[in-house]
Amino acid sequence: MPDATYLTSPLLQGAGFRHAFFTRHGGVSAGAYASLNFSYAVGDEAANVDENLRRAAAALGVAPDRLYFAAQVHGRDVLELDGSESSSAIMHTEADAIVSGCPDLACAVRTADCLPILIADRTTGRAVAAHAGWRGLVGRVIDAVASRLGGDPTDWVAAIGPHISTAAFEVSEDVARELEACSDATAPCVRVAGEKPKVDLAQVARAQLLTLGIAPEHVEHVGGCTRLDPMDYFSFRRDGRHSGRHLSAIVPRTA
């Protein structure tokens, strides 16, 4: 049985947090969902998703029923877990971030072009997984996450996982202006005469994270473009509804 493959953040590893940004390799799904798909809603067999989730939980060192993700809606709602919740119930609850301080569960989000962002507090051991597409960034989901994580942002480390890159993310002029307005980043949007603007979502997210008070050296991007790398990543923009979804997850630790 192949292992589920994933990327990691040296920052999060150095702070003692188990985590993973899973690629599309090491699962049992087939066809358009080959092979490590984590969504029940895209047309994959439920039994395949179940097994993929079991493999992810094993990689993270938690029980399968301790892997939590919500029904994401491109909003800013954050679910805070104390460990007593049912993961199957949370799966059907609308939210775009999961936060907890319970060290035997994993906070997770699913993506297929949007940004997965994992943030951890080195002092308290609390951690959060957030889903941020352009709507989430404009809606300030990162600010909502920060208010629920608590603690001192100077103690936080953050990692941005694989997502659609600037070269592959064209938007309307209206969307470009919204993203510029919600970011202190310098020129997050690229404009070329006769073409639609292209946006660096990671630059927008990084600027918002730094505004919270996180040190620049405590924010990193682990790399990978979902749309331009079909061998390693699923992409909704590339493949439409019948594409898989990635999982990114982090396990809180004791203080």
Image (cartoon, grey):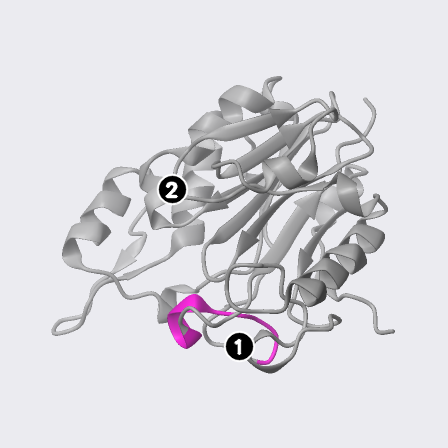
Q: Nearer the viewer, residue 166 or 141?
A: 141
Quadrant location, the C terminus: top right
Up/down of 55 relative to 194, above or below:
above
Q: Residue furthest top?
A: 151
Q: Nearer the viewer, residue 74 or 200?
A: 74
Residue at horizontal 22%, vertical 51%?
A: 175
224 lies left or right of 127:
left
The residue that disc 2 covers is 136
Q: Residues within 10 Å of mark 2 (few under 14, many from 20)?
A: many
Q: Within the image, what quadrant is residue 98 found in?
A: top right
Residue 195 picture location, percent across and down: 17, 72
Up/down of 212 relative to 160, above or below:
above
Residue at horizontal 40%, vertical 72%?
A: 240
Mark 2 or mark 1: name the one nearer the start of the chain: 2
Q: Within the image, what quadrant is residue 121 found in?
A: top right
26 lies left or right of 162:
right
Q: Residue furthest left?
A: 194
Give the extent of the magenta segment. 231-239
Magenta residue check for 234: yes
State the mark number for residue 247: none
Residue at horizontal 54%, vertical 41%?
A: 92
Helix, strand or loop at mark 1: loop
What amino acid type is highlighted by mark number 1?
Answer: Asp
Residue 14 picture location, percent across and down: 79, 42
State the mark number for residue 229: 1
